[in-house]
Amino acid sequence: MNNYTSDRPGFGRRKFLLGSAGALGAVVVGGSGILTGCGSDSGPAGSPQGPPRPGGRLRSVIAGRSASADVLDPHQAGSSAGGAVSKNVWDKLVAYNNDLTLRYRLAESLEPNADGSQWRISLRPGVVFSDGSPLTARDVLWSFERMLDLAKKSSGDLSAVDMSRTRADGALGVVVSMKSPLADFGSVLAGWYCYIVKDGTADIDGSKLPVGTGPFALARWSPGDRTLLRRNERYWDGPALLDEVEIIQIAETEARVNAFLSGEADVVHEISYLQARTLSGDPGTTVVVPPAGLMGAFQMRVDTAPFDDVRVRQAMRLAVDRQAMVDSVYYGYAEVGNDVYGKGAPFHHDTLPQRSYDPQRARELLREAGRENLTVTLPTADGSPGMLESATLFAEQAKAAGVTIQLESVPADTYFSQVSGKAPLSHLGWWNYSLDYFYGQTMTSDAPSNGTGWRRPAWDATFAEARAAMDPRRRGELYRALQEELWNEGGYILHSFAKRPDAAKNHVGGVRNGVPGTDDWANYATTWLAEQ
């Protein structure tokens, strides 16, 4: 994963808190999944002077969406703010550590049969929902059925599960049958949407307060604006210290930091890289830098002109100067990307040739494709750190290849729900997951988030074979083949893996230094407030 440290020349002294990943009594499960104990591997990033203090309301500002695009349902909530609410109100069976190993949460164990066609989940005893009702196998079965609803974004997470043959095995056991063998069920269960809700839960739309097994309970939800959480005294992992958490949604990066600087918030998530550099010099602020980066890319729809010609896609990939992106957009808080997802994940193909900036070769490819002097439109917004800056720099870099990129400004709060993956060329950012999970969500022909229009039955078949391979060496071979095809012909211009800094006032303690996408990021179970 990203190994940039805080001594990059030109940054000066700053209070960067770099997390570490650790495994507690790791055991191998199935083909490759590694599961550890129930605690967090990221740990608190730092604390004020003195012991942790109970009480108070934490105010956290985070990237959100418009009122019309915001959703509360954990099986639908795809935004940063929606994810923050989900992970503090509900819990998963297993969760990702910062290094993409796994740890048990509501599950006590996962056990496959010999070929991965069936898995047994043993639930942690003594867990109750915030209303006092016990967690049982019925809740898991209901949650799985709910997640598999094709109208929900979660449907891709558990697409391998055959619910017609999945059953309870006692009060705390679930035997899960697969449509085809699955070697790493744990990494799927740790996916973004895989929360366990109470048996019988129907619509989660704020009309009725839902219950969960997380550290907080929902008290009030105002779509696109603010969410109020209160401590869940029945939390199985020990009650949180905070009385309340207020999650404030602000779509624009600059406006989020302004809210933090004005005193409206104690913590700000997803700040820009220049803002992180500036705030590091503030004696009243701690900049929190996660130990690994997330995918930053432009995505081309391979089923839409002009990107339905592989020569155009290859030319566009050669028209971006990735090192300049890292230096100028991310101020060194990043690593160069190479057009395939998953840097640091198991089975990532890290020996592919590094694609470099070659505008002359890009011109040749465009000439061969009959697309000289190509003009394309890139919708962009200030929706996440580096978006506007990377689009602006890419447009400048592409000129040398004879490509004119016209930037179209669109609202930040609807970009990822209405533009990304729908326009022929758009921004894409994905957090850190296993290849199993990411490909199931984005790359198969029926994936719910297939923003590049990549639909190849032969690729799907190889992916299914890779998911089923219990032998890690065989899985590695298959995943390398999948990535080679994507590197040669896919639709991602994956320019970087950028760390996503957050910031906290110095009266905030116990901030978890989680990689975005893990359940530690924006999780306030260990956070506390010192006296001011």
Image: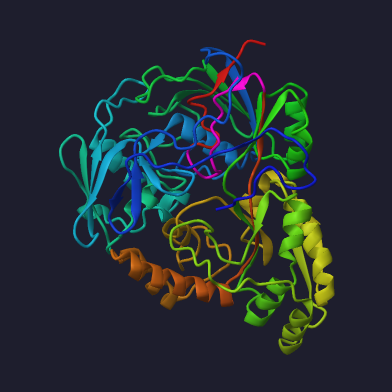
Q: Residue at x 30, y 66 (%)?
A: 469
Task: From the viewer's side, name the closer residue of 501 and 305.
Answer: 501
Task: From the viewer's side, name the closer residue of 337 and 380.
Answer: 337
Q: Say above or below: 279 vs 56.
A: below
Task: From the viewer's side, name the closer residue of 43 and 67.
Answer: 43
Q: Residue at x 34, y 53 (%)?
A: 33
Image quadrant for the C terminus?
top right
- Observer able to see residue 450: yes
Q: Where, by quadrant of the figure, is residue 114 drawn?
A: bottom left
Judge left or right: residue 200 versus residue 112: right
Residue 493 position within the rendered picture, expressed as x and y whole percent measured from the top left: 65, 66
Q: Say above or below: 341 vs 477.
A: above
Q: Where, by quadrant of the figure, is residue 428 drawn?
A: bottom right
The kind of secondary structure the magenta stretch mainly shows is loop
Residue 396 position within the rendered picture, expressed as x and y whole percent measured from the top left: 84, 65
Judge left or right: residue 44 versus residue 96: right
Q: Where, by quadrant of the figure, is residue 10 drawn?
A: top right
Judge left or right: residue 432 versus residue 364: left
Highlighted magenta segment, given as a residue range? 506-519
Residue 369 position within the rendered picture, expressed as x and y whole percent measured from the top left: 71, 86
- Observer able to see residue 148: no
Residue 275 position within the rendered picture, expressed as x and y whole percent measured from the top left: 76, 39
Asked if the stretch drawn in magenta spans residue 63, the answer is no
How does the figure colour the protein chain or chains? rainbow
Toward the bottom, the furthest residue is: 368
Q: Say above or below: 259 vs 478.
A: above
